[in-house]
Amino acid sequence: MTRYVTHDLKLAPRPDEAAAQDFVAALRNHVLNPLAAALKARFEAEVAPSLPAGATGRDVHAALKGDRLFRFYSAARVKAQDMVWASVRTTVARERDALSARFRALALARPAGGTLTLDPALEIPRNVAALDVHRMPGNYHLDGGADDLAAGALYENGLSVFSFGLMGETLDDIGQSIALWLRHRLPDFAPRAILDLGCSVGHQTLPWKRAYRQARVTGLDVAPACLRYAHARAEALGVEAHFLQADATRVPLPDASFDLVFSSMFLHELPRADIRAVFREARRLLRPGGLMLHYELPPNAALSAYDGFYLDWDSHYNSEPFYQGYRDLVPADEVAAAGLVDFLEASVPSLGWYGEEAVIAAARAEGAEASDRLGRLADGVTWYCYGAFRGPNP
Amino acid sequence: MSERLPLPEEARGRRPVFFDDPAVDTLLGMLLELAQAQWVTRDRLARLEHWATHAVTAAAVPFDDSYALPAEAAQRLAAERDAFVARLFAPVTKA
């Protein structure tokens, strides 16, 4: 199932390793599709009738905690999560030095003309350094020093198993879907400079360069090995992008230097104070008329109590301590507080699942369509995004 | 690069426990490890059976890590894998 890593950094898992990955992907598919559907049916039949009107996601969680199916679902999901990383770790470890050699060759040749700028003095923020997000051993910031790509390889190959095809053939369905949606939502928007915050290995960075060929695209993250991997990956794919090691709450770039500031699955990894700092930074970095746009988990207000509970599962059990607090925020209020205007939000159908016409149709619709597919990695996923513009005033 | 620290095997942080008796969580984890190992064996057997049936007579085709099932057989095996996982969990969804 590392079959979705197809560029020059792809690994060569042995047949037994590939079979082990296939099993984990099938396990996750089963847990997140039929088992999740059975859990919801159980809730609706046996738990919902006894909940008071106005019950929240937290109430649903409390009511289901003792349920036998919830316990099996959750225990299997945690085990499957650990098996994702275990299923790729051996291959990454064996090929670690070979990946470094490929990085050196690509960084030297730079066939796409991209760049990598690391800052060895950068302090890794505590919300990254202190935990292993998604139970990934070592976390994103794991770094073996010069030329090490292991954290990036672990993450991308792990994601390939984790997402069992739902992130697209090249694991960039979010970026591809949202870039296509934006081109049709704002047909006159022609950004010259695009910034992707918290870009990790650059999956969702490169679709912006493909969508807006004239733009200079920059990806920013704190994790050096992920950024090395992102740089090599972009060069291998022939897409020019510029990667920078920096903290998104304190970006070392000039005021008014971007037309689009984007992030995907990033804000929910941050404490609230940092989310607000990122929004202020985005406003500072945008030119007048520029757009801040985030792919994220949908807020509680957009979902039923059950669906809110379902998304918050990660916050309780998957080393995502800021997830629930993030989802309690009201995006429109937060972007307004940062001085941004003309809030917009959308549910963007997955390009890989629904096709181009569905994405274009969504660009013509207003608002985000609430559904139990919104922001949930399962069959028929739709991506929630929101944003706002920098007004004409300084 | 031998001076690099090896990749960690375990995630930091408390491992969630869901059952009143944590032994059930442990046993479920053991069961899934065992099922994965069984599947790895099944996958290898499927490749070996295919080789034995289709390629063994061609001396130039050895059975090694590069021997892969053709697409149609791989698709059948993937369906078998999904059905195997579904059978594992079938008792869980029964009342």
Image (tube, coloured by chain):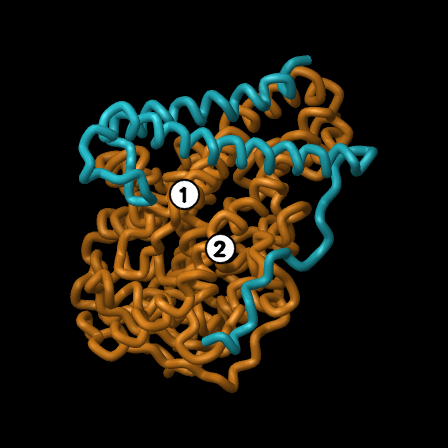
Residue furthest bottom as drawn: A121
- Identify residue type, mark 1: Ala
Picture quadrant where residue A240 is located: bottom left
Residue furthest right as drawn: B21
State the residue in front, A360 or A248. Answer: A248
The chain assigned the colour orange in the figure is A
Q: Colour of chain B?
A: cyan
Residue A296 percent coordinates (x, y): 47, 51
Q: Secondary structure at mark 1?
A: helix
- The answer to whether residue A39 is left or right of residue A247 is right
Measured in 3D between alpha carbons, the distance from the residue under mark 2 to the one under mark 1, in whole angstroms, is: 11 Å
Q: Secondary structure at mark 2?
A: helix
Name the residue beneath numbered marker 2: A90
Q: Residue at x 57, y 34 (%)?
A: A307
State the residue in front, A199 or B90. Answer: B90
Q: Which quarter of the figure is the N terminus of chain A placed in?
A: top left
Picture quadrant where residue A276 is located: bottom right
Check if mark 2's residue and mark 1's residue have beta carbons within 8 Å: no
Name the residue beneath numbered marker 1: A18
Q: Residue at x 51, y 64 (%)?
A: A140
Residue A305 percent coordinates (x, y): 63, 33
Picture quadrant where residue A45 is located: top right
Q: Residue at x 54, y 71 (%)?
A: A277
User: Could you tell which of marks 2 and 1 lies nearer the N-terminus?
Assistant: 1
> Is any atom of residue A391 visible in this view?
no
